[in-house]
Image (cartoon, rainbow, N blue to C red):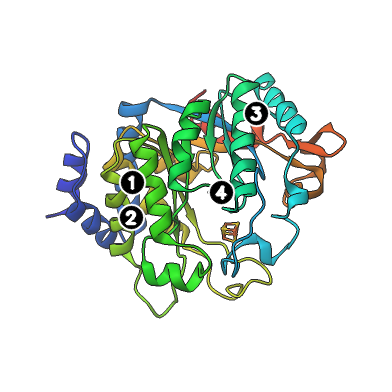
Amino acid sequence: MNVDTVLKEALVRPISREEAFFLFRKIQSWDRLMDLFKAASKVRDDEVGYKLKLMGFISRIAPCRTEPVCKYCFRWRDSESFSEKAVPTTEQLKIAAKALEERGMKSVSLGGGTDRSEEGRAMALNAAKTVCENSKLKVWAGSCSFLPEDIPKYREIGVEGITCNLETINENVYKELRPGESLELRKKIIEATEAAGLGIDNTLMVGLGWKPEQPQPYEDWVEFFFYFKRFKNLRILEVHPFRPIENSPVQAWPPGSVFEAEKARAIARLIFRDIDISGGRSLLSLLAGANLDMHCYPVSKASRAWREDLPCRILRLEPDLVMVDNYHIVTRAARELGMEIE
Ligand code: SF4
C-alpha cells in the first residue's frame, strides 16, 4: 500500500478501514497533508458540491444533571451554564425559530445538557416539538436528554435527526473522562435513531484523553468512524480538537492537535463521501473537505451569551434572549474560495 495509490483510489470509491488507518499513520508532513486535502476536497466537490451549508443553533434545551460532571465540560468554568436558568421558555424558542428563519436558515441544531429524569426528557421533547410546530426548520435534536424508547416520539413530532455525541469510542477514556455517562447507553440511542429512520449526527473529539507520552490513538479514531459506517442514516459528522476548560480537572492537559483533527476530517470525507462534515468556517477545514457550519446564528438566554463573541455581534431578540450574528465570520473563508453559500 502506498499513499498515492490509496488517495487515487479514494477519488472513485470509499476507503477501507485498513486504508484509513494507513493514511492516519503515513500522513505526517505538510506536503502529504496537502495531498490528502486535495483528495478530500475533490470528493466533497463531487459528492455534495462546492458549497457551504449553514445551520442555526439554539441552546440549552435542557439542563445538565450528569454527576459526576464530565471532566472536560464547560460546567467547570461556569456552573450556571447548564442550569435550568439557561433553558429558554417555550415563547423564547418560538422567537428563536422565527429569527433563524428570517435569516434564511433551513435547519437548526438544538443543544443542551443531559437530564434523563422524566422532567428533563419532557423538556427536551417539548423544545423540539415547539421548534417543529412553529417553523419550517429541519430540527436536529441534541442534548441527549432522552432514552432509546423516546426516539420514536421525536420521529412523530417531525424532527430531522438526533445528536447523541460519543466524542470517543474508547471505553477506558470514556470511563475516565465521562464517569457520570454511559457509552453503552449512548450507542443504544444511536441504534434507536437508525431504527426510527432519523438522521444521525455525531462528534469525534480529537485529543480527548490523550497524554503527550502516548502515540496518537489512530485505532480509536478508525474504530469510531467504522462504528458509524454501519448506519445508513449518518448524515452529519463533527470533528473537533479537545479544548481544555479553565478550572476543569483536565485544564492542564494539552489541547487536541489541529493537524490530527484536520487529518481526521479529511479521512472521514474519504470514508463517508456524501454526508455533511462540520468545520466549514475554517479555511483548513474547508480544504480538508468540510461543507457545514452548525453555529452560524447561535441563540441563547442573554445570561449565557457566548463569551468569546464581541458585543457588537450580539443581537437582542427579547430582554433575555440573544442571537450572535456570525454570518460574515462563518462564511468568509468559503466566499474567498468562491464556494456557494447555502
Ligand atoms: S453530559 Fe455534556 S453537558 Fe453534561 S457534564 Fe457531560 S459534557 Fe457536560
Name which residue type carries label 2. Phe
Residue that badge 4 annotates = 145
Amino acid on which the number 3 mark rests in the picture: Thr
Q: Is residue 231 left or right of residue 68?
A: left
Q: Nearer the viewer, residue 168 or 195?
A: 195
User: Compared with residue 312, is residue 23 higher up or lower down, i.e. above or below?
Assistant: below
Mark 4–mark 2 Cα distance, whole angstroms, equals: 22 Å
Q: Name the element at disc 2.
A: helix
Residue drawn at x 34%, y 67% as measured from the top left: 217
Residue at 29%, 41% (x, y): give it.
231
Question: Which residue shows up at 24% across the image and 58% down it?
Answer: 21
Is the Cβ of the residue at disc 1 closer than 8 Å to that at disc 2? Answer: no
Residue 88: give x, y in percent of width and height. Answer: 74, 40
Q: Nearer the viewer, mark 2 or mark 3?
A: 3
Q: Earlier in the sequence, mark 2 or mark 3?
A: 3
Name the residue carrying label 3. Answer: 130
Left or right side of 111 for 167: left
Residue on which the image places disc 1: 268
User: Residue 37 location in percent, x, y?
Assistant: 35, 44
Crowdedness near tag 4: few (<14), some (14–19) or many (≥20) residues, C-alpha within 10 Å: many
